[in-house]
Image (cartoon, rainbow, N blue to C red):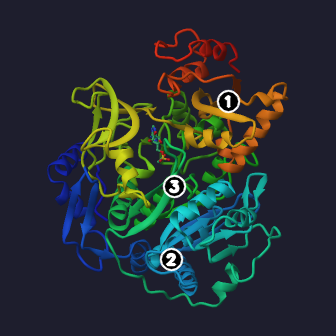
Amino acid sequence: MTPAIKSLEEYHKVYQRSIDLPEAFWAEVANDFQWRKQWDKVLEWDFKKPEVKWFDGGELNITENCLDRHLITQPNKKAIIWESNDPSEPSVTYTYRELHAKVCELANVLKSLGVQKGDRVCIYMPMIPELTMALLACARIGAVHSVVFAGFSARSLADRINDADAHLILTADGAYRGAKSIDLKAIVDEALADCLGVRSVLVYQRTNTPITMQPGRDLRWHDEIAKVDNLCEAVTVSSEDPLFILYTSGSTGKPKGIMHTTAGYMVHTAYTFSNVFQYQPDDIFWCTADIGWVTGHSYIVYGPLLNGATVLMFEGIPTWPNNGRFWEVIDKHKVSIFYTAPTAIRSLMAGEHSPKATHKLDSLRILGTVGEPINVEAWEWYHEHVGKGNCPIVDTWWQTETGGIMISPLAGITPTKPGFATLPLPGIQPALLSEKGEEILVNGEEGRLCIKFPWPGMARSIWGDHNRFRETYFSAFPNYYFTGDGCRRDLDGYYRITGRVDDVIIVSGHNLGTAEIENAIDEHELVIETAVVGYPHELKGFAVYAFVVLLSEAKGADEEQLRKEINEFVSRIIGPIAKADKIQFVTGLPKTRSGKIMRRILRKIAEGETDNLGDTSTLLDPGVVEEIRKGRV
Ligand code: 7RM
């Protein structure tokens, strides 16, 4: 690997060069990898179509770069240290040699099940090493993985399986999550009633919960592995062949299958891992995300393994069996880089508890956050009580669509300010746009965060819907990629993300589309119409507030019972993460004459701002607002 940037002065120099000569800059990074064939052209792009190609004409296999390459230099280095949900279950490690063999075995199973290059494989699994192996086994044979977070419902899973047209599902009998367990196989069975294209289900045994196996379709992981050997030549793929699809919530009800391709994503995740975290070969790196989200893809699987790092993988949750679990794991495995979400920090800082008083935490060198804006109080608590005042914090801003980190300090190099993601990484060209679509060039202003030049890790499309890709990201501001975030650039040129400006709410670090929740609530037989907005919440960052219009038949019904039923619907249709925190029954929603719901007004009411609702003159029936305001829950 090209050595990471070592000083602020060097950062400024490299950044300038990456803007002046982007192709030369990224080609140099790409040269660090193992290619089967050198690319013909570093970059081709047109944000109007949009079409972006990095390292076109090149051929490679990303797993050779994650695994085979390290077998020569460090076969016995630990690749994965796995820590169970249950503190009394022994941890498990895999060296690079062992991981390579496991991935090859599983890849052979996939081949035996008829999976071919370009086929989509859906992965619905707990946080166990086999999940990492599953992603890499797909990549080994050029199949496209589509991981669905194991907290999603059968309905959400079915939608994603069908959208990607996956014929094979990798799953487990169940998943442990704190004191609970989730019957994954039962959820898969329910989903598959609506997925006619699925031919096989491979089931890993984790919880030993009784499951039903459908003959001819369902196979046991252990049985199939026993039939194959552990040699599997990596399939050659082209730079722009798809590596994975990952679904994310959007402004409309239908989740978007964000599609990433191979070479650019590889270059971006590897480069950012090494530079942002200032990775050193003896580091133990722990990212607490689930692999079901992009953070897990890029910074549990690809980024660390591409760098030959040792990565800790944790099956459990921060609050079980108690609030000290994270700190215990850090001490047990001597974690040196710890990367987590503000929502986890907020939930652990409640009360008087100070981790530094009860745990050593002396292996920690660098801390990171991702997923939502971090409030100054949480930042300072993290710095003081986890980092003991001497670990730099990297507040990393990025998205599923960006593939890897975009705006972030370089640990220990970029001077930090609480709440600021600070400066763009080399190769990244952010821009703030005014609502009129003009680029804001001065500092000290807020605008819509856009990116004006391609970067290797960027998504290339929405699976099966390139039009929607253009509409969502490239139409608000022609020739710019629009992130959906608001952002302020201060007088020092530092970026501070202020939050979503569209209909996505980030609840405990999970992105939820308001339309998706509304659709789920509307499925209740007594519901006519729903409007969902977010409101600030101390622990979750934002919480879900639903305004629900009921049919007249519902008059006199038990409201508490109805609220319960509605949330059961949401849970069943989307997943428990999307439940509404507050449900207010109303007789009508504030609408414009053209029939648009005025969410701005509902947002204010949900926030508790009931006096200053702004301009309500375009409302069809201003009386409705008065009623909603009075009935706030
Ligand atoms: C990596 C990830 C993306 C959205 C993004 C932002 C928000 C992420 C930060 C942040 C403020 C941060 N992908 N976001 N990181 N906001 N500071 N450091 O989270 O696709 O799931 O979400 O998350 O709104 O657009 S994601």
Q: Residue furthest left?
A: 20
Q: Which mark is residue 465?
A: none
First in sequence: mark 3 vs mark 2: 2
Given residues 580 and 625, the one toward you in this image is 625
Looking at the rendering, which quadrant does residue 171 occupy? bottom right
Q: Is residue 611 visible?
A: yes
Looking at the rendered structure, which numbered label has been put on residue 76? 2
Residue at mark 2 to residue at mark 1: CA–CA distance = 58 Å
- Which quadrant would the C terminus be assigned to in this image? top right
> Which amino acid is tagged 3?
Tyr
Mark 2 belongs to which amino acid?
Asn
Q: How many C-alpha atoms fall within 10 Å of the one at disc 2: few (<14), some, or many (≥20)? A: some
Question: Which of the two discs, 1 and 3, sits closer to the camera?
Answer: 1
Q: Is residue 352 visible?
A: no
Q: Counting residues from the N terminus, which is met first, the one under dot 1 or under dot 3?
A: 3
Q: Residue drawn 68% across and 22% down?
A: 587
Q: Nearer the viewer, mark 3 or mark 2?
A: 3
| Residue 620 in the figure: left or right of residue 346 | left
Residue 39: percent from left, percent from top? 22, 72
The Cα–Cα distance between marks 1 and 3, rounded to whole angstroms, is: 27 Å
Q: Which mark is residue 247?
A: 3
User: In the rendering, at what x and y percent does residue 338 appear?
Assistant: 52, 49
Residue carrying label 1: 548
Q: Secondary structure at mark 2?
A: loop
Mark 1 element type: strand
**Residue visible at 20% across and 57% down?**
25
Between residue 260 and residue 198, name the one nearer to us: 198
Q: Quadrant of the N terminus?
A: bottom left
Circle 3: element type: strand
